[in-house]
Image: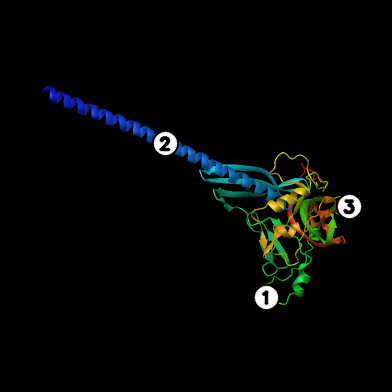
Amino acid sequence: MNDNQNFERIIKKEKRKKLLITAVISSIVTVTIGFVAVMATTIILGKQMDVQAEKQINQFNIADLIYSPNIRSTSQRYRLTAMTRATLSSDRQKNIDGYRVAYPEKKVILNLSGPESSSETSSNIYKNDTIKNINIMAANPKTGQKEPIFFNRAYPNWYSSQKNKDKLMSPITPTHEAKTLQALPNTLGEVAITFDKRYRYEDILKMMPHNIMINYYWLGFHSAALDTSSHVGCYVGLNAKDDGSGKLNDQFAGLPDKTKYNDYQGLKKALKSQINRKDVDHIDIAKDAEKQLVPSLKTAEFAGVIVTGRTENLAKLDQLPYTYASNVGITTPIMPYQSPIK
């Protein structure tokens, strides 16, 4: 082999080595760029999901205040199920005179655009055309538990004044179910009381019997056009303290978490901040409620309450002069190892 052949072989070998080194460097650069791109995308998407999570937690807290008649969230969980998908869930319960009764979980599935789906479902409504001797009854579709109903006192007169009634719901005769609870001894119950008129908060505290627990204050409706059956589950109001005092707070001082909505002043903030507004018969429920708010709790008026207690005490509520309607919700047996608050 002459020198020229050796030289050509060396040149080819060096070329292959350079090509190999170039390929390796190129691969490393490509992998590095790809890794950086993936990491950057992950960080960006993660931040976007964090923004959505914060927004939905805020909306959770708003809904917990606005649309939770004697329903309280006990915990919230956020779980990322994919890079651009997550679930936000909340355990809930009712306070039945000190007994904690489980209520269906609330869950929202999120993506980068916002809520994808929700576990919230409307109550099943039954009337006398489906169940004998029932004016109206609402039941939770997941558990079958009876839901308490409030009545719009102004609707019957409004309905009578309308010329075209073809598309209108007929007025529902007010129920008086509280008295039926006398047939359930050794039991605790929940009853929605619709007043004969709106009463001031301080007057309600004085006029309600002391052997029952006030759990919730209902604002009522400003619009007379909202019928009883259509607005089931769209009640705006405030849950009272859990200690049996029946009291509300006008305003909590120094709340550290801006996403927490509490008290009467918090209700005003929540109604203005709500994104997913409820609309019934083309009426914005939040705006309707805002029309009934006043500067402070001292002069606030409410159209009804949800109360809980022993059935023998609740049964007497229909005898009170201010009871326009009473409608039973959940009932639960009294256990020998736990005394009710009242």
* Between discs 1 and 2, the one toward the N terminus: 2
Residue at image point 20% right, 29% down: 12
Q: Which residue is mark 2?
A: 33
* Between discs 3 and 1, the one toward the N terminus: 1
Image coordinates for residue 270, horizontal then vertical, percent = 71, 50
Q: Which residue is mark 1?
A: 166
Residue at image point 59% right, 49% down: 108
Viewed as shown, does residue 176 lie left or right of 103?
Answer: right
Disc number lying in front (3 or 1): 1
Q: Is residue 70 visible?
A: no
Neighbour tally class for label 1: few under 14, some 14-19, many 20 plus, Cα within 10 Å:
few
Disc number lying in front (1 or 2): 2
What's the residue type where badge 1 is placed? Asp
**How many numbered dots are placed on residues in this image?**
3
What's the residue type where badge 2 is placed? Ile
Q: In the image shown, does 190 or 119 lie closer to the viewer?
A: 119
Q: Are marks 2 and 3 in contact (CB under 8 Å)?
A: no
What's the residue type where badge 3 is placed? Lys
Q: Which residue is mark 3?
A: 206
Q: Are marks 1 and 2 in contact (CB under 8 Å)?
A: no
